[in-house]
Image: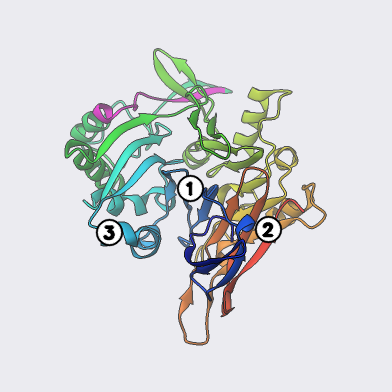
Amino acid sequence: MHGTWLGVLEEKDNHYFVQTAGDDGWIHREHTSDHMGLKVFFIDVGQGDGILIEVADKRILVDGGPNSNLKNFLTKWQFSYVLRENKPIHIDHVFISHFDADHYEGLIDIFSDVRFTFGTVYHNGIARFDDDKEDRPAEYNSKIGTKVGSGHDIFLTTSFNSIDDLKNLRDKGGFSETYERFAGAVVTAHDSGRLRGFTRATHKTRDLVIPTVQAEFKIEILGPVTSKINGDFAYEWFGRESKTTNGHSLVLKVTFGGIKILLGGDLNSRAERWLMEHYADSNPFEVDVAKSCHHGSSDFDVEFMKRINAYATVISSGDNENHAHPCADAIGCAGKYSPATKPKVFSTELARSINSAGEILFGMINLRSNGSDIWMAHMKEAGGGADIWDSYNVLE
């Protein structure tokens, strides 16, 4: 598969005899490259999101799921070779779409693990408090910030930006139990020199650009779309706390050469209409591959789905939850509103299986690109030699 490391054991007549994760064999030199391109791993974290992006020498996490699945993937599989060399696993950028436990709780142990170091952590600026705690800051009259305005002009305002803001809020008290643990892990990692930056990101945040030999890599932050009230960041109120928190997820557009990927956190229909209103006649949402918003929830806007117009959609969801994710209408529309003759809809939950030995095969979705083509795959239940992946050329 494109981007997989090969060990060259012998060279003859423009062919290499290579060692791979599957069977060894011959491959034509033209079918190899010194550059791995773009790798995106949609990790099966159960009911939640966890994504690893690798490009050039950079490693990027988007969310961390609710459990240890992501950490296990990083330490026991993907970067186990780094640990064997007694080196730290460095993550250059971490994007936390929003602070629901199924998106960030799994990061707590990763931030706490001294085997990891980090560049910058980006978040949406909406911390989480516990209304039942007596020491909750008085100025926070909801679990996530301060509501201002009335009628149709209600906003959530917060002043939570930097690591110092996180420390000050923690000292005031009142964080939810999970967020208290998260704050402690982040502050400890920062103060010990393992984490460089911690900052709020909005639609006005500068693009992250990484030049590579093959193509330029870029992450644009399309949302949350915010304004300012009395110097504080203000977020449109979407009817209730959960809708507002989810709806102001970080919305990331990943570009590598000519291919584009949309990562929309837990957007809902109100939020999608808010984003479309902001961007008006422009359409920055059209991409080749999209991660389905909110785990394939029914709470989506059809016009927004049409604007995405993806060849392939990835749904990250889990068992034993009461929302029935992924929902039938979300799966159907992901296929319907696509330019592909055969649209691809991948699911981490549906790709999970148990093989004949009784081992759980977690349903990771694997994306590779050279900047002009996209291949996506999930692992088969029973591998046939080197052919252990059910693979598709997405743009065919």
Marks 3/1: CA–CA distance: 19 Å
Q: Which residues are magenta?
A: 153-165
Residue closest to the eye, 153 or 194: 194
Q: Is residue 36 above or below residue 383?
A: above
Which residue does the image show at 60% across and 41% down from the upper left? 262
Residue 53 is labelled as 1
Query: Mark 2 is on which residue type?
Result: Val
In the displayed structure, does residue 348 sit left or right of residue 298?
left
The extreme bottom residue here reads 356
Q: Label 3, on which residue? A: 83
Q: CA distance from mark 3 to mark 2?
A: 35 Å
Q: Is residue 157 magenta?
A: yes
Image-based side of 349 in relation to 158, left or right? right
Q: Which residue is mark 2?
A: 345
Left or right of 322? Residue 95 is: left
Residue at 60%, 58% in the rendered image? 29
Q: Nearer the viewer, residue 315 or 94?
A: 94
Label 1 to label 2: alpha-carbon separation: 20 Å
